[in-house]
Every structure is written in structure tokens, then in C-alpha cells.
Image: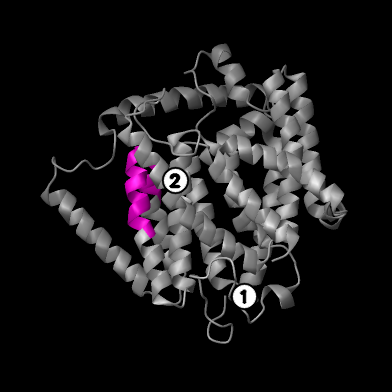
Amino acid sequence: MTKNELVLLILTASIFLTVYVEIAVVLLLPIYLLVTKQMFILFRRKADVTFLAIFWLISMIVTIVQGGSCLDILIGVFMVFAIIAMIFITYTMTQRIFRVILSFTCLMSVYCFAIALIQWELGMSWIWGERYSSVFSNPNYYAFYISLVVLFCIYNISKSRRWQSKLLYLLLIPMNLIALYLTECRTTFVVLLLVCPVLLAFFQHKRWLILYLALLAVGCALLIAFRGHIPLLPRMDKIGEDFMKRLDIWEGALRSIQDAPLFGRGYNSYVRIHQLYGSFTADHSHNLILELFMDFGIVGAMVLFAYFFINIRKIIRLHRQNQCHTRYALTIAVLVCVFLHGLLDITMLWPQTALLLMYVLGFSTDYDKIFIFSPDRKHPIILIHSFRKEGQRKE
């Protein structure tokens, strides 16, 4: 493992030590690059730097001009460090460290579940009620992390050679579903039902998709048989009330977009505009597309979309070159997961969850294929993980 790969692993570990530790590690990353004389990587990723620099410059100017608070400006300043981290990830990501990170992320869900159980046992309560968030700052962030872990577990099951590894990741899925129930996040239950078959449909062998559909049919039959006794989703009694709040929030966001369509109002806009339009008080617009256009306008959002399009195009190109089939499936499933979550929330924009998304998209970089697609698929960090040889099965 190289020093840069070790830094990526430390960055991943910081996710599970609260968002404040993660932010501190991200802030220290440029110092590491300076000490190791690696700031040149910013110039090797010219397309990335160009799009992200334009986006940051526009968003920062707009935030200041639109009367952003000190917190809003600080968010903009932090984005510089986040952009450096994003470029570092795309430059450093290798197939080996990608597997280590996925394995580590899945295994750390046991730790997160233990913390959530302790919170539940202590009867802890927050502003959102008795919904447990583990090491995350909000139960919805924890729920989004769980949705990613379930996808990662399915991916690792398909890639593992040893039955012990398959069994481990298989057992982690129901454990995380129990943890998801502790979050009482209704959206994630629905998202997982829809996104899991997307991932399974891309696999070469369809037995996992058939098994999933069979289990889903059994679950639906049980719900029908015991209707009224088994709750369909957590907090069913509040769905109507919460949806009306969302509609009020979305109306305020849409009115803000209409008034500032080109450049938006900068970072953290909804906190500043909800009183202006008399919409429901919230920290954000609870919709990914609305949030992007409200904060950054048509110009800023298009620049950001262009950046992600470049990376997604590389993923598609690798897939067409008969490489990374399974990881391509994982990427598509994660993007669908983000889109579905984004209809009702912006949990993917929180530092702890956004970092995991960067990892999934980071492998699209045009790195050395001889090293990345090495026949040696084993890694020394998590010995329980073992993979097929390249000759037996292509990525």
C-alpha cells in the first residue's frame, strides 16, 4: 500500500469519528500534499480543476453578493479543501484501495450499528425525536450511508471468491436493515427496494436478481396477509403531514429560483430565503435539483453537471472496453440511489456521505491500467476478502 492509499484509508476512517474529525482531516490534506511535494496533481487533472475552479469562483462571488452569512462564506472556503480532496481521490484511487475502502466501509457498519443500539438502549432523543443517527449528524445521513453499504455488500458478494466472505457480507445486509429501522427513514426503505434490482440486473448471473424478486414477493405476501399488524413504513401516521411540509419548502425554493435563475443565491440559500417567501423553516430545500439551481443557478449547476458528465463518460468508456463491468453496475446503482434520495432530501451532500460517493466515481480516472488491472486481486489489509483472478472473471 502506498502512502497516498494509506491517506485515503485514513480519510475513510475519519467518517466514523464524526463529521468534525473528517473535516479536520480534509483541512490537513493540502498540508500533506505540500510536505510530500504532490501539489502538482492539481495540474495533471486540468479538466477537473478547470470546471471545479469555475464553479467555486461563481458560487463564492454569488454567495458574497447575495448577502451570505459568515457561515455561508465559510462553507464556500471549505469547498476549496473539498475540491482538493476530490482531485486527490480521482488521482490516487486504485483498484486495490477501492476494494479495501469498500470492505472497510461495510465492516464499519457493525460499529455504527453498535453505536445506534447504545443510543436506542439509553433512550436518547433529539429534535427529530427518537430516531437514531449513530456517528452521523442526522438519522437521514445514517440511512443514506446504510443504503450505500447494502449496495457495497451486494457488490462484494459478487466479487468474493471464498464462501466465508460471501456469508459475512450477506449477514451484514439484514443487520443494516435493522439499523435502518432505527433511523425511521421512510425514503431509504423505498429507495433500496428500487435500487437493489438495478444493481443485480447488471450481473452476469441472474440468480441473485431472481432470489431478490422471490424474497420481495414473499415480503409483499406477508404484508398482505398481516395487513394492519405489520407497519408498511416507519412513521406512517406522519407521511401526509411531512409531505405537505415538503411541498411548502419546494414552493419557496422554486420562487427563489424564479427570482435568481442564472446564478442563484449562493451556499446555504434556503436558510436565508425561507422567511422572504414565508415557506416552512428548514436547513435546505429537501430536493437535490432544487437545491443546486437555488444555490448556484443555471450557470453554476451546468458547470457542475459538466464536471460529473466527464467522469461518468469515462466510466462508460471503461465499460465499453470490456473492463469494470461489475463496478460499472455499482456506479449506475449508486447514481440511481442518489437520484431517488434526491427527490426528497439532499443527504448525499453531507461530508460523511459525499466522500463515499467520490470514491465510487473516483475510479474512472485514466490511471495506469497495467497497475490497476493487475492479475493480483488480493490485498493485505482485510484478509477475509479474496477475489477471482482476472483470467477467470473480468471486472
Question: In the rendered image, is residue 340 in sight?
Answer: no
Residue 323: which numbered mark, if any? 1
- Secondary structure category for the residue under label 1: loop
Colour treatment of the image: one colour
Q: Residues within 10 Å of mark 2 (few under 14, many from 20)?
A: many
Instruction: First in sequence, mark 2 or 1: give its number.
Output: 2
Q: Residues within 10 Å of mark 1 (few under 14, many from 20)?
A: some
**Residue 358: image x %, image y %?**
63, 51
The disc labelled 1 sits on which kind of residue? Gln
Residue drawn at point x = 59 percent, y = 70 percent: 380
**Residue 384: image x %, image y %?**
48, 70
Q: Residue furthest bottom?
A: 391
**Residue 253: image x %, image y %?**
55, 25
Image: 246 above or below 350: above
**Residue 156: image x %, image y %?**
47, 67
The disc labelled 2 sits on which kind of residue? Cys
Image: 31 above or below 63: below
Image: 120 above or below 94: above
Please name which of the two marks, 2 or 1, marks the residue nearer to the observer.
Answer: 2
What span is colored magenta in the figure? 172-191
Residue drawn at point x = 56 percent, y = 33 percent: 290
In magenta stretch: residue 183: yes
What main secondary structure does the magenta stretch of the protein show?
Answer: helix
> How many marks overall?
2
Query: To which quarter of the image does residue 391 belong?
Result: bottom right
Query: To which quarter of the image does residue 139 belong?
Result: top left
Q: Nearer the viewer, residue 282 or 299?
A: 282
Residue drawn at point x = 32 percent, y = 64 percent: 212
Residue linked to disc 2: 112
